[in-house]
Amino acid sequence: MGQPACVLAPKPAPPPLPRPTLVPPRRPEFAFRTLLPAERRSSAASRGATLAVSGLIHTVLLTLAVVVPLLVFDDGLPATEGAVRAFFTAPPELAPAPPPPPPPAPSAVRARTPRAETPPPAEPARLVAPVEVPEQLPAPDESIGLGVEGGVPGGVEGGVPGGVAGGIIGGLPSAPVAPSRPVVRIGGNVLAPKLVYEAKPEYPPLAVQARVQGMVIIEAHVGIDGLVRSARILRSIPVLDDAAVAAVKQRRYQPLLLNGVPTEFILTLTMNFQLTQLRSAS
């Protein structure tokens, strides 16, 4: 058998060394108590002395700045006596006011001319009933034309013998004058009748050369036969107005019937002139 193995036991670790504790040194308290109050007292005293000295210096400088110019430049200053006298001189003597004018002499009493008395306005004659009824009436004056008894053939009731200047021959017309036909404006519930013929406006050569284009608005008056009677321009382009009016007057509509009666009407038309239409047509 072999020899038993030798086992070495571990050595115990050495104990840790104690750490030294650092203690801050104490400063003597008497230094703060003795030096700090001494500094405060010395600064306050120095400040007070500085203020007193600066105030004294400023006072001396201001006094010198005021007094020295008065002493040095005394001869150059203007005299005050003349200025004071200028303000307190006596006002100039004014001429006395003229005496008032004497009162006017009493004028002779003018003789009063009597005024012509205007007669009072004449009152209109009043018809007074006679006290007694006359037995015979006076004959009428033949110079006054009273017409012919029974009238004249073709005469008018209440007419004047011999006629009147500007009168109507044969008296008043027997047949009554026919009432004017109403004119309806297209719009709202009133629709424009069907357009039978439409003429396109011709582009004026001058407008083509000037490259003028735009819109002309026209108001057309159409009769009972559907033909345009008149045209009025509402929005104008001077170069294009004549061509637009000529195209509108060539239009033709179906008659407008209101309750079965042909009626004239007014409608607004827009004539549009564009240079692109000429290009597409060419």
Image (cartoon, helix red, strand yellow):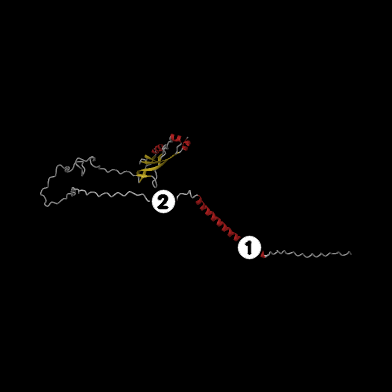
Q: Position of residue 232 (x, y in %)?
A: 38, 40
Residue at 66 percent across and 65 percent down: it is 30
Image quarter of residue 254:
top left
Q: Position of residue 6 (x, y in %)?
A: 86, 64
Q: Give the camera-side residue of 38 and 145.
A: 38
Horizontally, residue 231 falls left or right of residue 77, namely left
- Position of residue 41 relative to residue 114, above or below, is below
- Position of residue 178 relative to residue 24, above or below, is above
- Position of residue 110 relative to residue 246, above or below, is below
What residue occupies the far left of the structure in this picture? 135
Q: Position of residue 56 (x, y in %)?
A: 55, 57
* Quarter the N terminus occupies: bottom right
Q: What count of labels does the image hold? A: 2
| Residue 30 at least partly seen | yes
The amino acid at mark 2 is Arg
| Helix, strand or loop at mark 1 | helix
Residue at 41 percent across and 51 percent down: it is 85
Mark 2 burial class by Cα count in 10 Å: few <14, some 14-19, many 20+: few
Residue identified by numbered label 1: 38
| Residue 118 at least partly seen | no
Residue identified by numbered label 2: 85
Horizontally, residue 74 falls left or right of residue 20, namely left
Residue at 51 percent across and 53 percent down: it is 67
Measured Cα–Cα span from mark 1 to mark 2: 68 Å
Image quarter of residue 261:
top left
Horizontally, residue 29 falls left or right of residue 11, namely left
| Helix, strand or loop at mark 2 | helix
Query: Could you tell which of marks 1 and 2 lies nearer the N-terminus?
Result: 1
Q: Give the camera-side residue of 58 and 126.
A: 58
Mark seen at residue 114: none
Mark 1 burial class by Cα count in 10 Å: few <14, some 14-19, many 20+: few
